Amino acid sequence: MSARLPVAVERLPLRVRLSAAIERLPESQRLVLALRLLDGLSAIETAGALKLTSREVDSRLALALEALAEEMGSARRRAA
């Protein structure tokens, strides 16, 4: 058994909660989050792909991250 397996199993509930929290984001924020963080596009590349300004991309990303932090923090407080 891999030494990493217990850590991965331990983190599974966190990953499930995070995935669910991402799904609850508005689509516009979800798209920006995916392109910026998962696909690694720059703000300018993301803006071009979504026909937004780079300022709109930055704003939507900030809102998405704030919402995720709040939701994950709330979930952590509920679990404690």
Image: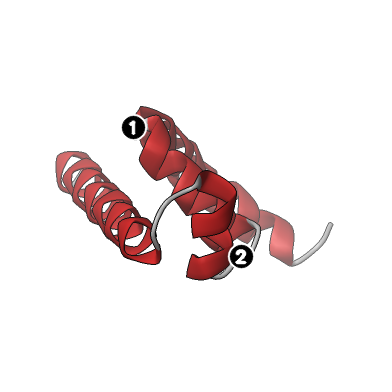
Across and down, in percent, residue 59 comes to 27, 58
Q: How many marks?
A: 2
Residue in the picture at 56% in, 56% down: 48
29 left or right of 47? left
Residue in the picture at 61% in, 65% down: 41
12 left or right of 54? right
Residue in the picture at 39% in, 38% down: 28
Q: Amino acid at mark 2?
A: Leu
Q: Quadrant of residue 57?
A: bottom left
25 left or right of 48? left
Q: Is residue 16 visible?
A: yes
Find disc 1 in the rendering and name its residue.
26
Q: How is the image coloured?
A: secondary structure
Viewer-proximal residue, 71 or 11? 71
* In the rendered image, the vertical position of residue 11 relative to residue 2, given as above or below: above
Find disc 2 in the rendering and name its residue.
41
Find numbered disc 2 in the image and state the secondary structure of the residue it sits on: loop
Across and down, in percent, residue 32 comes to 46, 50
The N terminus sits in image quarter: bottom right
Q: Is residue 10 visible?
A: no
* In the rendered image, the vertical position of residue 56 relative to residue 22, given as above or below: below
